[in-house]
Each structure stands twice: as C-alpha cells, then as structure tokens.
Image (cartoon, grey):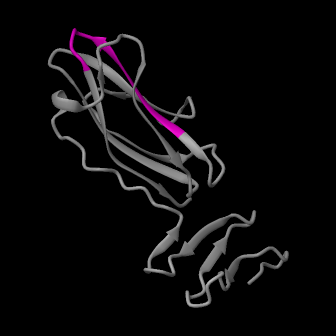
Amino acid sequence: MKRQDGSQAMSIRLGTDETIPQPVRLFDAKGTVIWADDVRTGGIAYPWLGLLPPQNSNPAASWPKTDSTQFVRVANSFNAIWQPKIRLFLHTVADSGTGGEVRVLVNDRAWGPAVRAGDSFDHTDFTSAEIGSVVEVAIEARRTSGTGSVYAQPKMFYGCQT
C-alpha cells in the first residue's frame, strides 16, 4: 500500500521461508519501519517496547542519590525513541533537614522543569531525537541545604503520541 506521493505506507510480503505467515509492516513518511507483527508467535515484533523493571521503594537502601551541592548525574539510561514524545515520572525525596533539586536531561539538554526534592517529576514532551535513534536520559540532583542526601527514582517511563 502506498501514499499519494508514491512512498510505501504498508507491506505484506513473503519472507524467505514460505511456511511462515507473511509479516505486516507499517512505514512512516520517511520510509522507516515503525511497526511489524511477530509472525512466529503473535504480538508485536517491532518496535521493541521497553518495560521498566520493578524498583526498590526504600530510598535510603538503593535509590540513586547525591550529597553534592552541584548538579551531578545520579542515574542514566540509553533508549531507542519510537514515539514523538516521552513521559517520565519519578519520585524524589531528601533526608530530614535537607533540601535539594532534581532535573532531567535528554542528550545533555534540560528536559522539563527542575523539581524540589520531595516533589514528583512528571513530564511529557517531545525530544529533539529522530524516530529510531538512541538518546541518553540522565537524572541529575543536588543538595541545596542541610547535610543529607537527595534521592530520585524513576517509576514510569514510556513513549507516547503527539
């Protein structure tokens, strides 16, 4: 199936093994495969959709933290981008008597607002990344008062539509 401009929008084609059902593929306007079905076992073959593993709910035990008075990276990950926007939700806390801030960077650029330690970061927005590219998402934190640590823990992260 083609668009009015002649570019491919969808294909159903035979693979190298005729005993396997024909895969269905959808293409974006630039010709990149944005979806394909898994013909062997069912479900989606492409894109791979990441799942966030269960996280520790005890901040002091294992959450990323810092006691630095300058922003420092406490956590980062690399992610393939398949939707135009991403959503990140994370909890932040600080030790008693300690204040701080947490911010998120995408490819070393601020993404969303910095939040006060103790508030949740919940942000959905575009990235400057091309579909299918890999971006680095980093969480940075700093202590602004007191002598304790500032903690941040991702709880939800996914791509979404415009």
Q: Give the residue drawn at x 56%, y 52%.
A: 81
Check if residue 76 falls in the magenta segment: no
Direction bottom: furthest residue: 19
- Counting from the top left corner in percent of width and height, residue 129 is at 63, 45
Quadrant into which the C terminus falls? bottom right
Quadrant into which the N terminus falls? bottom right
Residue placed most toward the observer, 44 or 73:
44
- Counting from the top left corner in percent of width and height, residue 31 is at 74, 66
Asked if residue 64 lies left or right of residue 56, the reply is right
79 is higher (above) or lower (below) than 106: below
Check if residue 146 falls in the magenta segment: yes
Q: Give the residue drawn at x 56%, y 41%.
A: 135
Asked whether the viewer can see residue 113, the reply is: no
How many labels sit on residues? 0
29 is higher (above) or lower (below) than 82: below
- Counting from the top left corner in percent of width and height, residue 76 is at 43, 34
29 is higher (above) or lower (below) than 4: above
Q: Give the residue drawn at x 27%, y 27%.
A: 151
Asked whether the viewer can see residue 24, the reply is: yes
Q: Give the residue drawn at x 36%, y 10%.
A: 69
Q: Main secondary structure of the magenta part?
A: strand
Quarter-wise, where is residue 30 in the image?
bottom right
Q: Which residues are magenta?
A: 136-149
- Counting from the top left corner in percent of width and height, residue 19 is at 56, 90
Asked if residue 33 lies left or right of residue 109, the reply is right
Residue placed most toward the observer, 15 or 64:
15
127 is higher (above) or lower (below) than 151: below
Residue placed most toward the observer, 66 or 162:
66
